[in-house]
C-alpha cells in the first residue's frame, strides 16, 4: 500500500476520535441526504428534548441517581451531560487508539473556563501525526482553529496565528457541533438500540448500543468536511459506556465504534475501529494553555489511575 493512501486512511481515523471540532482546512459542506438519510431528513426529530428532561428532573426532591430510577437511561445521561456542560469550570482528557492499517495513539482534551472553551486533538504514529486546537470565545462567540505538529505522542508545537476563524453558525455547519455543546452523539429513545444500568461501588454504569446511523449524523458531517470524504461515512457499530456518580456527575465515557470511509480517487475503503477513554471533571478549574504550552497528559492520566 502506498504512503499517500496510508496517510489518507490514518487521517480519517484522526478526524473522528474526539467528537469535537478540529482546525484543519475544511473541504466542503454537505446536505443531509445520502443513501442512509432520505430527502428532508431532520436530525432534530431524533434528538433528545433536553429542556423537557431537565424540567422534569428539576422538579424532583431527590436529584441523586436514586431519584431518577424511573427515568430512561437516555434521559439520565442527558441530565449528566447538561449538569457537566453548564458548570462554570469543567474539563476532560481522553486517551486511546484509532486502529486502521497501523495504530494511531490518541490524546485529546476539552476545557471550559468561564465563557472560554478549548479543545485539542493529538494523533501520533510512525507514519503520520496531527495536532489540532480550537478556541471558542463565549457561548455565542467566534471560534479560532490552530494547526500544529506532534513532537511525540503527547506534545505538539503550534502556530501563534489561527489557521481560520469562524462564526458559531459557520463552525457548527462545518463540524457538526460547537465547543460549548461538547457532546456530538445523538442519544435519545429514538437512537438507542439497547441500554443497561448497573452499579459498581458508589457509581452507576450506563451502557448504550446506539443506532449507528441516527446517533452519528453530526459526527459524520464533521468527518466528511475534515477529511474531504466522498460521502458520509457509514458506521457499523457505536457502543458507549458511561460512569456517573451518585449525584449524576459524569466521570468517564468509553467509546467503542467502527466505521468505513471512502474518498474519491482512492478505491480502498478505510475501516477504522476507535477505542477511546474520556475522563471528566466538573467544578474543577483548569487553565487553557497558550499556543506554546502543552498539556501534561501523562500526569493527568496517572491521577485517573490512582
Image (cartoon, rainbow, N blue to C red):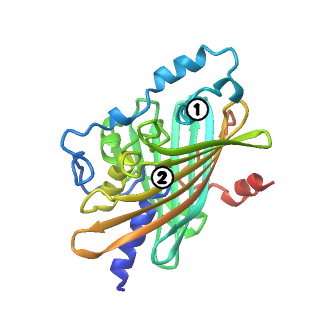
Q: Is residue 116 above or below residue 272?
A: above
Residue 230 placement: quadrant? bottom left
Q: Which residue is mark 2?
A: 133
Spot occupied by residue 21 in the image (x, y as percentages of width and height): 42, 49
In the drawing, does residue 273 fall left or right of residue 80? left
Q: Which residue is mark 1?
A: 76
Q: Which mark is residue 10?
A: none
Q: Is residue 264 above or below residue 192?
A: below
Q: Is residue 48 above or below residue 270?
A: above
Q: Residues within 10 Å of mark 1 (few under 14, many from 20)?
A: many
**Could you tell me which secondary element the residue under label 2 belongs to?**
strand
CB within 8 Å, label 2 to label 1: no
In the drawing, does residue 34 fall left or right of residue 63? left
Q: Is residue 163 above or below residue 61?
A: below
**Could you tell me which secondary element the residue under label 1 belongs to?**
helix
Badge 2 or badge 1: first in the primary sequence:
1
Q: How far apart are labels 2 and 1 at the CA level?
A: 30 Å
Spot occupied by residue 69 in the image (x, y as percentages of width and height): 65, 28
Tell me which residue sits at (71%, 53%) in the image: 300
Spot occupied by residue 173 in the image (x, y as percentages of width and height): 30, 42
Q: Residues within 10 Å of mark 2 (few under 14, many from 20)?
A: many
Amino acid at each position: 500500500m502506498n504512503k499517500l493512501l496510508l496517510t489518507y486512511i490514518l487521517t480519517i481515523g484522526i478526524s473522528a476520535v474526539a467528537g469535537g471540532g478540529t482546525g484543519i482546512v475544511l473541504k466542503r459542506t454537505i446536505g443531509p441526504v445520502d443513501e442512509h438519510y432520505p430527502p428532508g431528513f431532520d436530525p432534530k426529530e431524533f434528538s433528545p428534548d433536553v429542556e423537557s428532561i431537565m424540567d422534569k428532573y428539576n422538579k424532583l426532591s431527590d436529584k441523586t441517581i436514586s431519584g431518577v430510577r424511573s427515568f430512561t437511561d437516555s434521559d439520565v445521561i442527558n441530565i449528566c451531560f447538561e449538569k457537566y456542560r453548564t458548570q462554570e469550570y469543567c474539563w476532560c482528557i481522553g486517551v486511546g487508539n484509532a486502529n486502521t492499517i497501523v495504530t494511531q495513539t490518541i490524546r485529546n482534551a476539552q476545557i471550559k473556563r468561564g465563557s472560554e472553551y478549548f479543545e485539542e486533538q493529538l494523533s501520533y504514529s510512525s507514519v503520520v501525526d496531527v495536532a489540532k486546537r480550537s478556541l471558542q470565545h463565549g457561548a455565542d462567540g467566534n471560534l479560532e482553529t490552530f494547526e500544529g505538529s506532534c513532537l511525540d505522542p503527547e506534545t505538539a508545537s503550534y502556530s501563534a496565528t489561527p489557521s481560520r476563524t469562524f462564526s458559531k453558525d459557520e463552525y457548527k455547519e462545518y463540524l457538526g457541533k460547537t465547543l460549548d455543546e461538547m457532546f456530538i452523539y445523538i442519544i435519545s429513545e429514538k437512537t438507542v438500540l439497547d441500554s443497561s444500568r448497573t452499579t459498581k461501588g458508589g457509581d452507576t454504569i450506563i451502557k448504550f448500543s446506539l443506532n449507528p446511523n441516527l446517533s452519528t449524523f453530526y459526527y459524520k458531517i464533521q468527518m466528511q468536511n475534515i477529511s474531504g470524504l466522498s460521502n458520509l461515512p457509514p458506521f457499523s457499530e457505536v457502543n458507549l459506556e458511561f460512569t456517573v456518580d451518585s449525584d449524576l456527575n459524569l466521570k468517564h465515557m468509553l467509546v467503542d465504534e467502527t466505521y468505513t470511509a471512502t474518498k474519491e480517487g482512492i478505491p480502498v475503503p478505510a475501516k477504522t475501529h476507535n477505542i477511546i477513554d474520556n475522563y471528566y471533571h466538573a467544578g474543577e478549574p483548569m487553565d487553557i494553555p497558550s499556543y506554546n504550552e502543552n498539556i501534561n497528559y501523562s500526569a493527568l492520566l496517572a491521577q485517573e489511575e490512582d
